[in-house]
Each structure stands twice: as C-alpha cells, then as structure tokens.
C-alpha cells in the first residue's frame, strides 16, 4: 500500500544504483531513503528516546514462538514471494558491468 508514496519509498532501480555507487566508492555505510536518514539523525540526536520507540515497535513484531509455519526452499519457488527473486535478477542484469 505504501510502496508508491513519494519521499517514503525509492524504486528498486534507484536503490540498486545507489548501492552500486557506494560499493564503488568503498563506502562502509549507505542509508537509502529519506525516512531512514531521518531515523538515523533522530537516533544520533535522541538515542534514549529512539531506543524506547524501537522497543515499542518491536513489541508488535511476532516473536519466534508466534511464528507457526516455515516454507521450505522447494515450496518457496512456487509461492507468491518467488516473484521478488525475478525482480532482483532483472535489476541485477541492468546494473552489471558490461564485459568486452
């Protein structure tokens, strides 16, 4: 639902370009997207507040005990999530250096 909001998301192509550029510059850290940059700045400015905030957020994430099913690799290829692998391969092929 929020995948199309400007300023909140970036395209896979842009993320790939920024990641590759950072790797070429040998950067050890690259923060992608405005929300992540804001969270990082807030964490630097207000570390205790952010720790409490992330504690609240993590309380909504299911614990290991609450996860009731796992999908083996063989079944994963038949699932709806397999499409992400195809998208990743497409982006990778567009950004690989050309061999001459």
Image: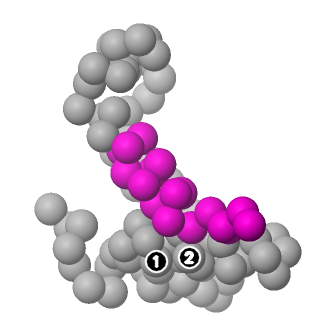
Residue 43, visible in the rendered structure: no
Point out residue 82 in the picture as x, y percentages from the top left corner.
Answer: 33, 33
Residue 11, horizontal then vertical, whole percent: 37, 73
Residue at (24% x, 67% y) in the render: 3
Is residue 96 part of the magenta span, yes or no?
yes
Residue 83: image quadrant is top left
In this picture, is 46 found above or below 93?
Answer: below
State which region is magenta.
84-100
Asked which secondary structure carries label 2, the reply is: helix
- Vertical side of 49 occupied by 37: above or below: below
Q: Are marks 2 and 1 in contact (CB under 8 Å)?
A: yes
Residue corresponding to mark 2: 17
Q: Which residue is mark 1?
A: 14
Q: Nearer the viewer, residue 31 or 25?
A: 25
Residue 65 figure quarter: top left
Q: Secondary structure at mark 1?
A: helix
Left or right relative to 43: residue 90: left
Task: Tell me which residue sits at (15%, 62%) in the image.
Answer: 1
Q: Residue at x 81, y 71 (%)?
A: 28
Q: Which mark is residue 69?
A: none
């Amino acid at each position: 639902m929020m995948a199309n909001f400007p300023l909140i998301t970036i395209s896979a192509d842009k993320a790939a370009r920024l990641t590759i550029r950072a790797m070429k510059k040998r950067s050890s850290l690259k923060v992608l997207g405005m929300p992540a940059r804001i969270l990082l700045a807030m964490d630097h400015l207000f570390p205790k507040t952010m720790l409490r905030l992330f504690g609240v957020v993590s309380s909504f994430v299911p614990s290991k005990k609450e996860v009731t099913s796992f999908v083996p690799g063989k079944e994963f290829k038949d699932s709806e999530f397999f499409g992400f692998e195809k998208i990743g391969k497409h982006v990778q092929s567009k950004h690989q250096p050309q061999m001459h």
